[in-house]
Image: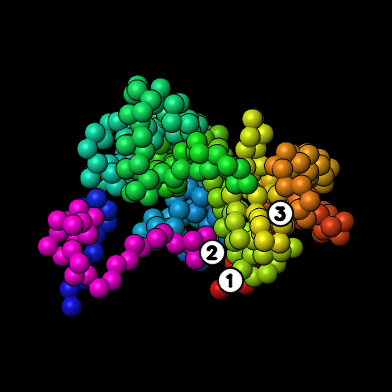
Amino acid sequence: MLVLSGSLMGIMEDNVLSHSSPLYGRRTAGFRLRSLGLFPSLRFFKSPIEGLKFYMLLGGIPAYLIIASRYETVGEFVEREFLTPEGYFYDEPYIVLSELKELKTYFSILSAMSSGRRRPSEIASEVGLEGRKIYPYLETLIRLGFVERELPIARKEKRGLYRISDPMLMSWFSLIYPNRTEIELGTITLERVEKILQRIFSFRFEDVSREFLVEMNKAGKLPFRFTKIGRWWYKGEEIDLVALNEDEEKALFIEVKWKDLKEREVKGILKDLEKKAGLVGLDGWDKNYGLIEKSIERKEKLREENYLVWDLKDFDALKILSQ
């Protein structure tokens, strides 16, 4: 038996899996290992809340989680491992992306995406490339699993948006790349990047909430079993998550916020969500509306009033059930 393992996807595909490889047609099995999901990742940490923050910052790569598990808080971890030249993650993307040629261009693309540029034209303009020339770079990043192309759910739309799908890269290009000079001078502080950290958590909490809903769906803890889930947007309006069962014509609309919300705020957001859901065009469908938040005041009272609301305490409860 011969087992070949490697983390450089381009080399594995070109030298092992391609038509020109001596091994082409001879392999009996192939596996592309994925990172761990939310709930397996939380088992690395004593505190579920801090574990969730670590997961949003790093994703589910076991080696990263082992390093993070040595720290009590995300703040201490970021100071030691991100904001010092000796930190484990300070040069990590240079290793992860080492197989790419034109590394400077790829770094510029990822930097543009981390700052909110998601349309190909916006990314190309930020990088200084002609519009069409950006696509080969984007396709390479997608193939390697660092970027994903997103299309709005429940709409026939060919023009997608692009986003960094690798959490560590998103964190690195947000925290380290624009602040390298200050880091090397030793003048950077955790307070200086606190807003950036909260922006990362807000961005990634949507992904985490999607994982939460998928697990709830598997456990049969939603009003119906959905078969599709994604984000919806159109002409400046956006809904964070929409879950659909097209056969049964049922929809669940979810707003996600990394905030602590009062009861009054929750009801206001749900009212606005219902208005936006009317723009999606699912006339005649059975519709449900919900919120996933950092924490929700008087959550049980809201549930008694038939509101679908979840916060971080529900993540912890579901983690226990999923073990």
Q: In the rendered image, which quarter is residue 177 located in?
A: top left
From the top left corner, tell me how far across and down residue 304 is, in percent.
86, 60
Q: Looking at the image, is 139 positioned above or below residue 323?
A: above
- The CA distance from mark 3 to mark 2 is 25 Å
Q: Nearer the viewer, mark 3 or mark 1?
A: 3
- The CA distance from mark 3 to mark 1 is 24 Å
Say whether residue 217 is left or right of residue 35: right
Magenta-colored stretch includes residue 44: no
Amino acid bearing label 2: Phe
Residue visible at 50% across and 36% down? 159
Query: Mark 2: few, some, or many residues within 10 Å (few <14, many ≥20)?
Result: many
Name the one closer to the observer, 38 or 236.
236
Q: Is residue 87 among what the camera can see?
A: no
Residue visible at 81% across and 54% down? 307
Whether label 3 touches label 2, CB < 8 Å: no
Q: Nearer the viewer, mark 3 or mark 2?
A: 3
Tally of numbered discs: 3
Residue visible at 60% across and 53% down? 229
Q: Which residue is mark 1?
A: 322
Amino acid bearing label 3: Ala
Name the one closer to the observer, 119 or 284.
284
- The CA distance from mark 1 to mark 2 is 7 Å
Amino acid bearing label 1: Ser
Q: Which numbered tag is attached to residue 251? A: 3
